[in-house]
Amino acid sequence: MAHVDIVGSGNMARGLATRLLHGRTDVRIIGRNADQTAELVESLGAGASSAPAGSPFTAEVVILAVPHGSVAEIIRENGESLAGKVVVDISNPVDFSTMDRLTTPAGTSAAEEIAALLEGRADVVKAFNTTFAKTLIEGSVADLPLDVFVAGDSESAKLQVTEIIARSGMRPIDTGPLHWARQLESMMPLMMALQVNPEHERFDWDTALKILP
Ligand SMILES: NC(=O)c1ccc[n+]([C@@H]2O[C@H](COP(=O)([O-])OP(=O)(O)OC[C@H]3O[C@@H](n4cnc5c(N)ncnc54)[C@H](OP(=O)(O)O)[C@@H]3O)[C@@H](O)[C@H]2O)c1
């Protein structure tokens, strides 16, 4: 059975692993916190396994479920092992102190920065940055499948990711080349600020961006 490597053992690792396992894709959690990683794998159940940080990647698709600020270090330390892989960037480079701006410079995106760091050794796909962890665990929003917006320059890499998304019961939406990550990332300060704005009590990280129908 196909498996995906997920770096990180936090909220998104849990949400993504839950959905992927639902779609019969095995997951290997590569966490630097051994206790948290073991707890996550145990709670995920069959199909989930773990490996310590720094382990060589064995899956074709590697999801970086870590903060944007940690990605450069991970690429520096695991660059060779990422060669030939599809690297999925889920990050939101948002200034968390204000939630009203991105931390990346204008005219680029976190995903494009990652692609530049990888220097063509791996294909980068932007995905999942608009799906909050809670909704991934729930698997739907308002009883409808989650939309997962995808951007990337490699059609074959995007196909691998969109197949995993569809198999997991979500709707992949291919937005185009990797530069569309700029738009996908820039939607999120607003989405995130609304979750913590007391004027919108109904929003509690359980909302989703979805195109109807
Ligand atoms: N939460 C959401 O709803 C959501 C939605 C869309 C996108 N995202 C994006 O998803 C990513 C992960 O978010 P999250 O909510 O899952 O964060 P989180 O709960 O804080 O988990 C982050 C994980 O990354 C690990 N990590 C951090 N730096 C690392 C490093 N240098 N090497 C190895 N592991 C490292 C952490 O390990 P330790 O526990 O040891 O620190 C932790 O396991 C972020 O880029 C975020 O912007 C989040």
Image (cartoon, grey):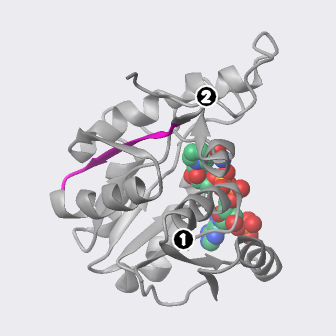
| Residue 204 x, y percent position in the rendering | 75, 29
In this rendering, which labeled residue sits more in front, label 1 or label 2?
A: 2
Q: Is residue 125 left or right of residue 52?
A: left
The span from disc 1 to disc 2 (Cα, nearest Å) is: 27 Å
Residue at image location 57% in from the left, 37% down from the top: 94
Amino acid at pointer 2: Ala
| Mark sitting earlier along the chain (1/2) | 1
> Which of the labelled discs sits on residue 6, or is there none?
1
Q: Is residue 61 left or right of residue 17?
A: left
The response on whether ligand 1 sits within 8 Å of label 1 is no
Residue at image location 67% in from the left, 61% down from the top: 14
Q: Is residue 153 left or right of residue 207?
A: left
Residue at image location 70% in from the left, 61% down from the top: 10
Residue at image location 60% in from the left, 79% down from the top: 30
Ligand 1 image position (quadrant): bottom right
Q: Which residues are magenta?
A: 145-154
Q: Which residue is mark 2?
A: 142
Location of residue 66 by image quarter: bottom right
